[in-house]
Amino acid sequence: MKTIDLNCDLGEGIANEKAIMPFISSANIACGYHAGDENTIWQTAELCLEHNVAMGAHPSYLDKANFGRTEMELDADDIYDLVTQQLIIIDEIISEFNTGLHHVKPHGALYNLSAKDKTIAKAIARAVKDYNKELVLFGLSGSYSIKEAERIGLKAGNEVFADRNYLDDGSLVPRNNKEALIDTVDAAVKQALQFVNEGKIFSVTGKKIKIKADTICLHGDGPHALEFAQAIHTAFKKEGIAVSAIQHASLTAHP
């Protein structure tokens, strides 16, 4: 049976966590820097436990004004500290439930920069590994985020997006482009199935591109988040595709 992780960015003040949880296997929880606070982390963690959803940190630039989607000029050491501080924040809260983090997925501009900037990708990977070497680092499929994580022995999850369009080189269409977002259920479901069944999708120019998918993301703040989550989950079930979190590094069998 084919298996795929279905993740969603949550705890961002949209208040749709309860509705979305039954359809996903991993949650990326905002750590308070671009959205959320101690209460939203706590509430989202409770729902994750209730629905057996893997908990991940969703660190960002300190930028609530722009929802973490504006790039900032920080050096590698600052990025390392930025990520570490947010891991500490969320870990302290969820430790009250006698559980821990499963993965880390950078948010917004930090995510996009780490995909194309080797130095920043390395700083994030190092911060995650130094904090907890068993964590999985989610990053844009095939990007520096993945390569730098794997280079230092950190387990990486190649992430793809059911609600975003792609350029010919496998990168995401920038959000300031009118073609950035997928806004119909049929298109989102079709792309999600292509990720799993074919390992290929069509770019906005119609070019078929090869892409590795370990985890599929839905943006929790998207207008169709719940609708997409339900439809994709249903389509996977119909196709015999299991929805399950990426195996935690500590559970991975080593030769």
Image: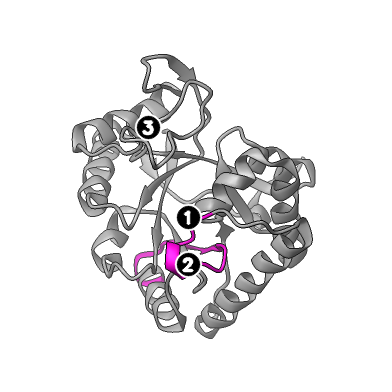
Q: Is residue 247 visible?
A: no
Q: In the rendering, which numbered label is found on residue 15?
A: none
First along the sequence among labels 1 and 3: 1
Q: Which residues are magenta?
A: 49-70
Three-letter amino acid code at the position of disc 2: His
Q: Is residue 9 visible?
A: yes
Q: In the rendering, which numbered label is found on residue 69?
A: 1
Are there few (<14), some (14-19), or many (20+) residues within 10 Å of tag 1?
some
Percent position of residue 184, x then y? 20, 37
Q: Residue at x 66, y 53 (%)?
A: 249
Q: Nearer the viewer, residue 139 or 222?
A: 222
Q: What SS does tag 1 mark?
A: loop
First along the sequence among labels 2 and 3: 2
Query: Horizontally, is 75 left or right of 241 in the view?
Result: right
Three-letter amino acid code at the position of disc 3: Asn
| Residue on which the image places disc 2 | 34
Give the vertical position of 152 relative to 105 (above or below): above
